[in-house]
Image (tube, helix red, strand yellow):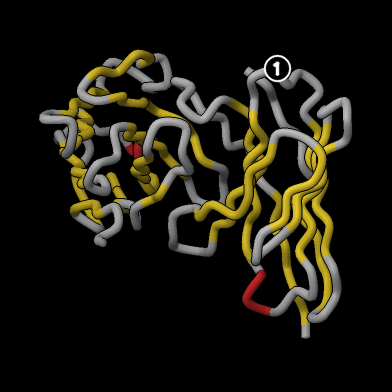
Amino acid sequence: GAGVSQSPSNKVTEKGKDVELRCDPISGHTALYWYRQSLGQGLEFLIYFQGNSAPDKSGLPSDRFSAERTGGSVSTLTIQRTQQEDSAVYLCASSYPEGEQFFGPGTRLTVL
Amino acid sequence: LAKTTQPISMDSYEGQEVNITCSHNNIATNDYITWYQQFPSQGPRFIIQGYKTKVTNEVASLFIPADRKSSTLSLPRVSLSDTAVYYCLVGYSSASKIIFGSGTRLSIRP
C-alpha cells in the first residue's frame, strides 16, 4: 500500500508568517511522530500521537509550534510567526503500536 | 531516556564487513535497540531491532552483549549504496519520546 506522505514537499515563507505542514500516515497506523532535521544534523523529536492524543508535547521547541491529529489519521504541524531558525526538514513517521517507524519524504521549510 | 553514543563517521571499502558500535550505558529493562539508515534527502528507514544476543535479517546483523550497554550493527560485504547515516536508538517502541542522536556517517569507497 501507500507509504507515509507529506505535503508540501517544499515550503518557502517569509519570517513572521504562519505555516501548516501535513502528514498522511499509513492506513491503520495508530502512532504518528513528528521530527525536525536541520542540515547535516540528526533528528530532533517534536511530538508523538497515539490515536488523536499527544501524551508528550515537551519536544515542541516553543509555543509557536502546535500539532493536531484528527480521526486518528491525518496530522498537521503548525508553526506560527516563523523564524529563520525554524528552517529545516520536517519529517513525519507512523507505526503500529510497538512497531517500526515508517518515514515520509519530509517537508523542506525555508524561512527567509 | 537512554542516551546513545556512536562514532561520528566511518570509512570502508566495497566488499568489506562494517561494524558500527553504539554505547547505551543507561539502557532500561524494557528498552529495545533499533537501527535506522538514512540516505540524503530521504527519511530514515528501519534496518534491524533487537533486545539481546544476536539478531540477523537479510540486510544486517545486530550483536548485543549480555549487559546490553552497547550494541554493534554489522553490515556484511558493503557496497557503494550502503553509504548513508546510521542511527542507533534505544527505547520502547511506543514510548512518547524517541531520541535519534547524531548518527554515524558511513562512507564506502570503491
Chain of residue at mark 1: B
Q: Where is residue B27 in the image (x, y as percent from the top left)?
A: 73, 21
- Crowd class of label 1 (few under 14; some 14 to 19; many from 20; radius 10 Å): few
Residue where numbered disc 1 is placed: B29
Residue A7 vs residue B26, the one in the foreground: B26
SS class of the residue under badge 1?
A: loop
Residue A39 vs residue B106, the one in the foreground: B106
Q: Position of residue B77 (x, y in %)?
A: 79, 75
Relative to A26, does residue A65 appear above or below in the rendering?
Answer: above
Q: What is the number of callouts on the image?
A: 1
For residue B58, side relative to residue B40 (left or right): right
Residue A38 vs residue A70, the one in the foreground: A70
Relative to A110, does residue A51 appear above or below in the rendering?
Answer: above
For residue B81, side relative to residue B110 (left or right): left
- Please, which residue is most extreme toward the left here? A71
**Quadrant the N terminus of chain A occupies:** bottom left
Relative to A66, does residue B80 appear above or below in the rendering?
Answer: below
Residue at 25 percent across and 45 percent down: it is A25
Residue at 31 percent across and 24 percent down: it is A50
Q: In which quarter of the image is residue A68?
A: top left
Q: Where is residue A112 in the image (x, y as percent from the top left)?
A: 27, 47
Q: Position of residue A101 (x, y in %)?
A: 44, 43
Task: Work out whether residue B77 can be spotted.
Answer: yes
Give the residue type that dot 1 points to. Thr
Relative to B107, does residue A38 appear above or below in the rendering?
Answer: above
Residue at 29 percent across and 39 percent down: it is A29
